[in-house]
Image (spheres, grey):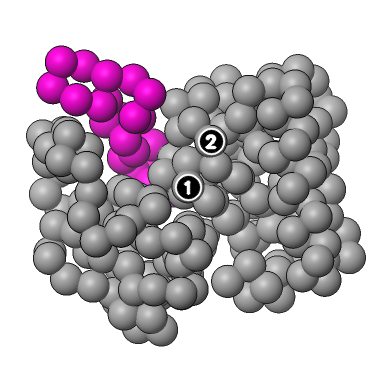
Amino acid sequence: MDADLLARADGPVVVTALAGTPGRDYRTASENGVRHFRALGAADVVAAPDAREDRGAALAVLRRARLLVLPGGSPTRLLEALRSTGVDDVVTALLADGGVVSGSSAGAMVLGGWTVLPDRHRAAGPVVERGLGVVEDVLVLPHWSGRGRADWLAAVDAAVPDDVEVLGIPEQSGVLVEGATLTAVGAAATALVRRGATLDLGSSRSRQEERSWSTR
């Protein structure tokens, strides 16, 4: 999956692990991402400075990206960091310019129109809030194993409009969103949770929004 994304990008790869805590956690996750893409053959791949610590320096690096990588961690922390530092605007500008965004786990979750925030709870279960809306009509449930946690699914059903597609994405798998098309990639099919159906590997379905991004 990642080799394919690398081939689609026409320039630098930038990793920013804002789903992790500042300091060692951020550096370790970002550097792991750099090593991964370097092993896939990326000639120009760097970790951005943490935008929560040095916003100007981080934005300068992030604006060079043609493939922007958002690793996993806390979706709550990631969503707050993206919005408070202006990195969300970098994501929007990159996609508008034909670039590629890759989100893993929490990184995939926040790109949808809606996201579960499992580290925030109400009496009825985890909080479900609006995401970045890169793909407005999608909510991602990562690490899908055939069935989700009942409290997550109940919270999603209570908060999220019926026309939002809920994607249950297994480990080592993903969905490529390219133009108006969702395509299942990786090791296993993606569950269309509300439909009780699957998006089989290599198969596609149409959607309305003209954006391009990847989740896994």
Left or right: where 96 falls relative to 75: right
Q: Is residue 5 visible?
A: no
Question: Residue at label 2?
Answer: 73
Q: Quadrant of the N terminus?
A: bottom right
In three-dimensional space, the C-alpha distance between marks 1 and 2, rounded to whole angstroms, equals 7 Å
Q: Residues within 10 Å of mark 2 (few under 14, many from 20)?
A: many
At horizontal 38% and vertical 36% (from top left) the residue drawn is 131
User: Between residues 202 and 100, which one lies in front from this camera angle?
Assistant: 202
Disc on the earlier residue, 1 or 2: 2
Q: Position of residue 75 (x, y in %)?
A: 46, 33
At x 79%, y 44%, the residue is 31
Residue under label 1, please give it.
105
At 45% across and 26% down in the image, what residue appears? 76
Total number of numbered discs in the rendering: 2
Residue 124 has which mark? none
Secondary structure mostly taken by the magenta-highlighted segment of the chain: strand
Dot 1, crowdedness within 10 Å: few (<14), some or many (≥20)?
many
Q: Amino acid at mark 2?
A: Gly
Q: Are marks 1 and 2 in contact (CB under 8 Å)?
A: yes
Closer to the camera in the image, 63 or 156: 156
Q: Which residues are magenta?
A: 111-134
